[in-house]
Amino acid sequence: MASEEEVLGKAYDSRIVRRLLSYLSPYTLQVGLAMVAIVLKAGADVLGPYLTMTAIDKYMTANPGASHSFLSRLLSPEPLVGIAQVSALFLGVLLLGFLFEFTQTYMMQWTGQKVMFDLRSQLYRHLQRMDIAFFDRNPVGRLVTRVTTDVDALNEMFTSGVVSIVEDIFVLAAILAIMLTKNWRLALIAFAVMPLIIFVTQVFRKAVRDSYRRIRVAIARINSFLQEHVSGIIVLQLFNRESKSYKEFEAVNAQHMEAFKDAILAYALYYPVVEGLSSVAIACVLWYGGHMVLGHVTVLGQLTTLGTLVAFMQYAQRFFRPIQDLSEKFNILQSAMAAAERVFKLLDTEPKIQSPKVEKVPAGPGRIEFDDVWFAYRHIPVEKDGKVTPGNEWDWVLRGVSFAIEPGETVAIVGHTGAGKTTLISLLLRFYDVQQGAVRIDGVDVREMNLQELRRRCGVVLQDPFLFSGTVANNIQLGSAHVTREAVEKAAEEVNAADFIRSLPEGFDSLLQERGNTLSTGQKQLVSFARALAHDPRILILDEATSSVDTETEFRVRDALTRLVEGRTSLIIAHRLSTIQRADKIIVMHKGKVREAGTHQQLLASKGVYWKLYQLQYKDQELGAPVAIAQASPQPEAQAD
Ligand SMILES: Nc1ncnc2c1ncn2[C@@H]1O[C@H](COP(=O)(O)OP(=O)(O)O)[C@@H](O)[C@H]1O
Ligand SMILES: [Mg+2]
């Protein structure tokens, strides 16, 4: 995770900037207003000393004729009136300055927030479209960082960084122009410290840049550490790993602090040093300027007015402040560019699995066919020179799997853990694409179907039920407009979940916490059964849906299952063989291949893998018992213990 955060490119990358600017295009009016306000504000900023200069030279010195400024010709020749005029102008400029600053700040911040909103929405939409393999490769923490921290870095650039750089540059240019035209010799004296300041700034920037990079890396580490250890808090407490994990956290945390300490040192040194240098510059201006005013300095060959000297001292002060800021802004810009690079890289990653251009719609009643399917999640990694890289060989998980499920049939899949059962479902739902062979629904390859259409056909209940925060009813309906409240309740009724839901404080409208943590696993399982059923799918898929529920719930589910599979093509993966004995066909998966297939009786008779599994599970039980209980379970409560 750290590696991507570590990259720090240029502060200005025209390709990235052009792309960022394109996000501003819907807000050209606001941006235009802000820009105009910035230029005017810069003008107001440099006007103050100019007014002071005019007032001093025209009214307060022995030689009033010294002032040739444009403004002085417009002012009253009467000193007291003229001073009042200048003061009024000064106040006016100040007020206008406030107004421009307000306009600029408000417009820019507003636009910045809009752009961030657009960008975050775009990122989320994009993430939703990504294929499952992408999420296998990218940890959640990294994606969260993209949508939050990185977008914030861009926001900072939009609101504080770029805008004030523009303002600073305008102010600098204006001051430079005024000073050079007014008295270029005095101006050069004021700028004599510039090379030193540039040198100090370079050193400072390097130091800060390095520690900022380390800070970012440390933050990324803290984030991913926290995420993992908070999600795993139960295991942590269970095995008394608190103090060990605390020590680990402390180490990561310390990295962050150390990195910050260096930045603080750089800041603490830089600002006073620049401050000192600019004081030297001002002292020089005062020294030489003073001589010039008094007419002593003939070496420089130019005299100056008192007003110009005062204005120069004010300008010199204003000149060095933006330079300090600029170096800081440069850092903001640099991290924003790096953040933009990461964000755009994510946006440019196209989902590998998309609906095809020309879509075919299967017309049949739901026949599923796996035709010589070969599939691997990854290449077999090879180790070379101590580095592990993906090799050329596929790490096959499915090796030539072929079978068919006729419309309306119920097919069960059994096999050891890791045999590839869940993978079959992932391929049917096209979460991954096969490397060889094909998965077809009613003769149409799933790769030729519209993705949403494909997934709408299938109702899936997974081993690990996932509920969102919201009400129970919402979790069953999941926002599908075609699922009515009646359908929700009817579905809950049919999977025997209604009575437990009604016993909740607010029934179907009870609020669930995140991931439905307030329900037991069995209850969550029942809710997700109701969810699958309420959407009335043509194909029903259960992946070990009952393996983590208690016996009572299993009876309820098994009871409901008979109704669920009615008129549907069903694919049931089960751990407990009791759930599937009545399936039309049982497929036994072994090491990525179909090992056996047939009905319960046929498979038992052939005494193969299935028979062994069956023996293992029912060694200690009477063989007929589960079937007998299942048949006698219209009142599940009665069977509870
Ligand atoms: N996302 C994944 N990335 C890489 N390998 C995976 C992934 N999911 C499963 N596998 C591997 O594929 C094999 C089959 O997994 P799976 O289909 O989940 O087995 P089953 O459901 O039969 O227990 C296992 O060896 C597992 O390690
Ligand atoms: Mg599985």
Image: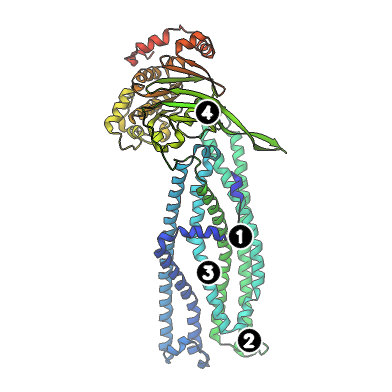
Crowdedness of circle 3 by 10 Å Cα count: few (<14), some, many (20+)?
many
Q: Nearer the viewer, mark 4 or mark 2?
A: 4
Alpha carbons under labels 3 and 1: distance apart: 20 Å
Alpha carbons under labels 1 and 4: distance apart: 62 Å
Give the numbered dot on residue 373. Answer: 4
| Quadrant in which residue 332 is drawn | bottom right
Q: Nearer the viewer, mark 1 or mark 4?
A: 4
Q: Is residue 64 left or right of residue 262?
A: left
Q: In the rendered structure, which disc, 2 or 3, sits on the residue that comes first in sequence?
A: 3
Q: Quick one: 120 or 574, which is closer to the camera?
A: 574
Query: How far from the left and from the top, in percent, is residue 365?
Result: 36, 27
Alpha carbons under labels 4 and 2: distance apart: 93 Å
Q: Secondary structure at mark 4?
A: strand
User: Label 3: which residue?
Assistant: 168
The quadrant of the picture occupied by the C terminus is top left
Q: Secondary structure at mark 1?
A: helix
Looking at the image, residue 576 lies above or below residue 532 = above
Q: In the rendered structure, which disc, 4 or 3, sits on the residue that comes first in sequence?
A: 3
Q: Nearer the viewer, mark 3 or mark 1?
A: 3
Give the numbered dot on residue 267. Answer: 1
Q: Given contact means CB atoms under 8 Å apart, are the residues at marks 3 and 1 in contact?
A: no
| Quadrant in which residue 311 is drawn | bottom right
- Residue type, label 4: Val
User: Label 2: which residue?
Assistant: 291
Q: Is residue 547 left or right of residue 630?
A: right
The quadrant of the picture occupied by the N terminus is top right
Q: In the rendered structure, which disc, 1 or 2, sits on the residue that comes first in sequence?
A: 1
Q: Given contact means CB atoms under 8 Å apart, are the residues at marks 4 and 2 in contact?
A: no
